[in-house]
Image (tube, rainbow, N blue to C red):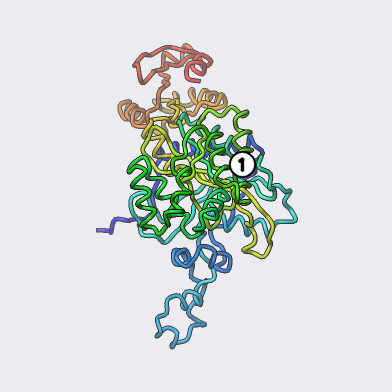
Amino acid sequence: MAQKPSIPKGTRDFGPQEMAKRNYIFDTIKQVYQLYGFQQIETPAMETLGTLMGKYGEEGDKLLFKVLNSGDFLAKVSDDELRERNSLHLAAQLCEKGLRYDLTVPFARYVVMHREELQLPFKRYQMQPVWRADRPQKGRYREFWQFDGDIVGSDSLLNEVELMQIVDTVFTRFGVRVQIKINNRKILSGIAEVIGAADKIVDITVAIDKLDKIGLDNVNAELREDGLTEEQIEKLQPIITLEGTNDEKLATIASVLAASETGMRGVEELRYILGALKTAGLKNEIQLDLTLARGLNYYTGAIFEVKALDVPMGSILGGGRYDNLTGIFGMPGISGVGISFGIDRIFDVLNALDAYPKDAVVGTQLLFINFGERETAYCLPFVAQARAAGIRTEIFPDAAKMKKQMSYANAKQIPFVALAGENEIAAGKLTLKNMQTGEQTLVTPDELIAAVG
């Protein structure tokens, strides 16, 4: 007996229903990006290891899927090198290419290679799979999709405003209530500067994030355990207990960071972004959250995160401002701001809320029954007419038993079935059956299109 086939661990098949839902997500986000003048690009699944290595840190390098050289990949490897079994050294000898780890580094490479062709600012979106040789577990895959949007070649804070409008529009179209969280890397740097604890900013944000759960006294105790002095903790109290509107929070932060030029720049940047968004009529709440501290080694300005309000789920979008996208390839000075939609988590949120529009997940709308050659010949012009009207239409390929054809319609959840026998052909009409109500009606082709469409 042949062995049952399988797929690699950490990868998935997506069936028709799942693909219909995923395509709804992709298409919705694409349409919104295009509304704002973004253009789509794609980069190869494989990049040279020279492009990928050293961009993700030592751990990231280990998680790169490397591709063996074509042909006799052992030709240039000596017996001594094989006996040493140094896997990293051998990989460098045997592999010149690797699967992309994310979309950011390939995008940076793309900008450098195509700089002369690009009109700056360049507004790009990209939706493609990425690969990481990680240990597969629930919610973590070796192959998964990213959907990024970036604006590069402009320092204007209007870009941050626009990205937040895009986020708001996308989730409003999904019918998902979200909270958009915003912070600024400069404010976090300013806090560290004012209290003299530059190496403790992550510990500080982690501790502050626990305020609602463990209370102020326990937060302060945790900060002591992290090595902060009583004087530093005292200076942090207005920050730890920060509350009120976004404007009130900014006023408090500004009073604490008055002596920090960097911190005050962050305050002014957020003040502009939040002020502009007030006039934009966002449907979802945007909240200043000082505990947001993503990508501290990468982001240099505003940072964003989005969480669904009605489903317990981690972040479903993240992003921020960065100063030097292309510096890793020897072209300094190109700043940008970007966001990345968490497609798999958004998929789970929409499933939990059953928020997919019916027409987004329904495939075929109309099935013509096949009674034989004469009946099929009669129906074919009407099949073409229905498709020309935009109705997703099938005709069963075989003159099988009626029960089998109706079972096919039920299994595919096709809402309407059309059939033509001797009487219908004589009358120049069709019988249309509503598969949900069971109602059958004799209709003209035009009436059929009106009923189904």
Q: In the rendered view, would you say 226 is above or below 432?
A: below
Q: What x and y, as percent, mark residue 363?
A: 44, 32
Q: Quadrant of the N terminus?
A: bottom left
Q: Is residue 16 visible?
A: yes
Q: In the rendered view, would you say 25 is above or below 444?
A: below
> Judging from the image, what secondary structure is the residue with disc 1 in?
helix
Residue projecting furthest to the bottom: 80
Q: What x and y, as percent, mark residue 248?
A: 54, 34
* Residue drawn at (49%, 22%) of the image: 378
Please name the residue that numbered disc 1 is placed on.
160
Q: What x and y, as percent, mark residue 398?
A: 39, 33
Residue projecting furthest to the left: 1
Q: Nearer the viewer, residue 190 or 318?
A: 190
Residue projecting furthest to the front: 231
Circle 1 residues within 10 Å: few <14, some 14–19, many ≥20: many
Q: What residue type is disc 1 on?
A: Glu
* Residue drawn at (55%, 26%) of the image: 390
* Residue drawn at (49%, 38%) of the image: 23
Q: Nearer the viewer, residue 224 or 288?
A: 224
Q: In the rendered view, would you say 387 is above or below 158?
A: above
Q: Position of 448 compared to 154: left or right?
A: left
Q: Is residue 150 visible?
A: no
Q: What x and y, as percent, mark residue 402?
A: 33, 25
Q: Nearer the viewer, residue 405 or 349?
A: 349
